Amino acid sequence: MARILSEFLEAAVGYDLGVAWTEGVDGGSTVNEDAVSSGAGSPSGWGSQCLLIDHITVTNSYTYNIFGATAIVFLAVELKVSAQSMGGGDALLLYLTDATLATGLFAVRLAEDSGVTYIEAVQDADGDTVFTVAWREPLVLDKLYRFEFKWDTTNDRWSIWVNGILFGDGALTGAAATTLAGTILIGSTASNVGAFTARVDSLLIDNSTRIGPDNFPLIDYSKFPIEKLAAGPRRLLA
């Protein structure tokens, strides 16, 4: 196992030592990497600080790390949403792309459908720029979600786990089979209509082995019943 990135937001000021992040914030939105992590849904494993994203519609509120083009990527992250107002739109929470931020591979987002706000994990495993929903459920405010992604261009495979349960696994085809992961973005851009407040912590990226729930023993996954809903294509806002 070779750990590429470990971000627990516990530095006295700013991000953890040795991890370079670039922020884009405007229009009254907030990106705060020193936010207090206590509150509903926050596990003790988050420590004293976490990343707060307070996204106002059609503004920028993101931070990203370019970890470099990597053939095999296993990513794990924990997050919760404490407020949202989608207004019929979508909003990014997390976005895994290539090293140039040009090609999306995986994303976690909020999306309103028939008046219900869902939290979704989506993938573009065929490289056609249309994201397909691998998992979604109606958003529960202050519920802790743990997402894991595998993007493996060496063996042409992708996988998505939510709270320790596998919900998507398949082959990388077309352009996706040769697109290496290289950037992780947290938050939303000005093209995203919905507004939300979210907290994120415990972001880990490895280049050989699934990080897995055993590395996060403070979460009791039996408390997170999840029903896999019908998946269908949804285009991610550019």
Image: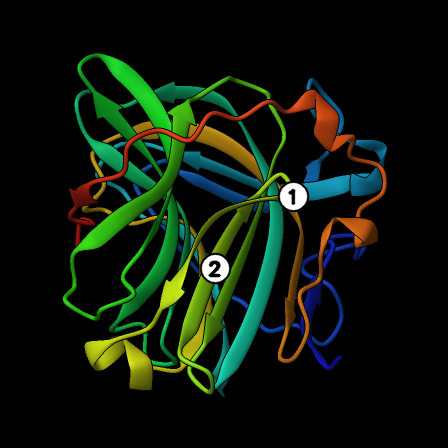
- Asked if 143 appears above or below 180 in the picture, the reply is above
Q: Secondary structure at mark 1?
A: loop
Question: Is 188 on the left or on the right of 212, as rendered?
Answer: left
Quadrant of the image occupied by residue 238: bottom left
Q: Identify the residue position indicated by label 2 in the image.
A: 159
Residue drawn 62% across and 79% down?
207
- Asked if 166 appears above or below 124 in the picture, the reply is above
Residue drawn 83% across and 40% down?
45
Is 101 in front, or is 121? 121
Q: Amino acid at mark 2?
A: Ser
* Quarter of the image that includes the N terminus: bottom right
- Asked if 111 appears above or below 24 in the picture, the reply is above
Mark 2 neighbour class, 10 Å CA radius: few under 14, some 14 to 19, many 20 or more? many
Q: Position of residue 67 (x, y in %)?
A: 53, 79
Question: Which mark identifies residue 164?
Answer: 1
Q: Position of residue 70 (x, y in %)?
A: 50, 85
Q: Secondary structure at mark 2?
A: strand
Residue drawn 38% across and 58% down?
106
Is 57 in front, or is 68? 68
- Residue 37 visible somewhere in the drawing: yes
Precedes in sequence: disc 2 or disc 1: 2
Q: Amino acid at mark 1?
A: Gly
Residue drawn 14% across and 67% down?
128
Is 88 in front, or is 11? 88
Quadrant of the image occupied by residue 58: top left
Mark 1 neighbour class, 10 Å CA radius: few under 14, some 14 to 19, many 20 or more? some
